[in-house]
Image: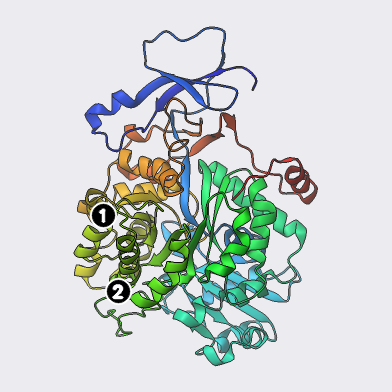
Amino acid sequence: MKADSLILGDIYSIARDDCPEAGLSEQLFCAMQINAAGRIVRLFKPGEKLPSGLTEIKPNGKAIVPAFTDSHAHFISKAVLAALAVNLARLENERIVPDSLEGVRQLLLAESSGGRKLLAAYGLCIAALKEKRLPVSAELDAWFPGREVIILSMDGHSSAYSSLALKKLKLEALAEDGILRAEAHEFNMGRVSGRILHGLKPAALAAGLAGAVREAIESGLVSIHCLEGTEDRFFDPGILLMKLLGGRLGPRLRLYLQYSAQVKAQRHQHSLHRLRAGGCLSWEMDGSVSSRSAAMDTAYLDGSGSGQLYRSPAEALAMARPYYSRGWQLAAHAIGPRGIESILWAYETLMDEAADQNNHLRLRIEHFEFPRPDQIERAGRRKLVLSVQPGFAWADARWIHSYETALPAEVRAAQCPLRALQDSGCRLSLSTDAPVQPLNPFYQIAGAVNHPNARHSLSIYESLRAYSYGGAYAAGEESDRGSLETGKFADFAVLDTDPFCIPTEQLHQVLVSETWHEGRPMQAPPETLPGFIRHILTSRPRKL
């Protein structure tokens, strides 16, 4: 694209922090002029005279909005699992299947061919099963005699193993009936993922990575914050793949190194666009509700206790201090209020010591799902970045109903309080936690707008902005991206439906027709190995 071009359509700039429905017309434009560098020269209101002599492009869709950023995903895990493992989460006729252990067995049998000695599966929704549990090792041994079997739960916080798999992983002592939960699961994922990756063929890797990029582009994503890295093994193949390939795949992948030790992370800092660390695994303050390991203030309804705190406030501070003092942005997983307290207190301590009132490093807390009222106020006062997934609560209320069996009603009523978080001053960024959920942003947007607790909901405008500007802000890139304004890059998604003109109950059905990045339509790499290699070799590398 050598000359300026003119994009035509209903273009929503989403350029203000908030916008009442009556003022939406102020941010609706009919044309957008883009220069050869992929930046926006000017936006035109309906009725304004358009410049002549420019190439006019009318994308195939009903509305144009700023492209999306998924601020919390495990991209390498998603790509590898898609290439090597069986997906045990299927949505059929408004219900999650399989819905019994027998259904799990049948699905695994149907998809267990291919010659690999290891049978890996992911996405198993425990709450959807009649038995409400993972299969134990005796069952897996009976289903697949003499074979390694690894099954990861949907939330990624518990897992089940056959006897041979436990033996190969040397995890027999940590497993109870072949099941790893809480810290036994979280802090051994390097060993497990390494085993799943063992014997990965280049063709399968290429197909998995290209498929993940294709899904991202079809979801309107131009950027993904990739929380990667495991600490329990010296060799980390996921980080190696990110460094070799991540900067050449198309979307802007931003790497957050999940290492607790700053000295380990700094070995990779030359590959980073900005110093970033944290996320999940070693940066988890607690677990999850589905695995009964989120550190809650009240007991779970099934009598399994109140969850597990992985890091005390003092331990969280000791982890964060070396990074903060060297200017690294940090992200930490915290779901229950006791987990939130650990990392929130650590951040407060560091910011107070540095007299930092504006969160200049954009410190983040991931999920922030069940905060106490005082934690909402404190996080807002510190302007913390919160990467949240309202699609969890929305999908659960619609299809799964696991929270109803796990937590008292008064606790569920405080889940993911988006309105209070935004009003307090927190910087919200919507995300999927892929591969836990698909990369489709409209599941999260539907969750934010149609929140199971209406007082926590956001408007359509606020949700779109949290998925575009919010993600750009979380990465420190809001001056160049996140809204459609003069001088910014022309990163936009073309939608098949105008989200402002449909019933909110249909938001999850909105599809992306085209995704443009820096003034050009995006295309995924070929899934064939020769085509994928050619794409990698001819792509200009970016820092992560």
* Residue at the outermost right position: 530
Q: Is residue 178 above or below residue 345?
A: below
| Residue named by callout 2 | 338
**Residue type beneath disc 2:** Arg
Query: Mark 1 or 2, which is nearer the eye?
Result: 1
- Which residue does the image show at 31% across and 84% down from the upper left? 305
Residue nearest the observer in this picture, 301 or 129: 301
Position of 68 compared to 384: left or right?
A: right
Q: How many marks?
A: 2
- Which residue does the image show at 57% across and 69% down from the upper left? 263
Position of 367 compared to 85: left or right?
A: left
Disc number placed over residue 380 in the picture, else none: 1
Within the image, what quadrant is residue 313 found in? Answer: bottom left
Q: Quadrant of the N terminus?
A: top right
Q: Is residue 139 above or below residue 189?
A: below
Question: Disc 1, disc 2: CB below 8 Å?
Answer: no
**Residue type beneath disc 1:** Gly
Q: Position of residue 408 (x, y in %)?
A: 23, 73
Q: Position of residue 124 (x, y in %)?
A: 50, 70
- Which residue does the image show at 51% across and 44% down from the upper left? 219
Instruction: Identify the secondary structure beneath mark 1.
Output: helix
Q: Earlier in the sequence, mark 1 or mark 2?
A: 2
Residue nearest the observer in this picture, 137 or 297: 297
Within the image, what quadrant is residue 461 found in? Answer: top left
Visible residue check, residue 357:
yes
Residue nearest the observer in this picture, 248 or 395: 248
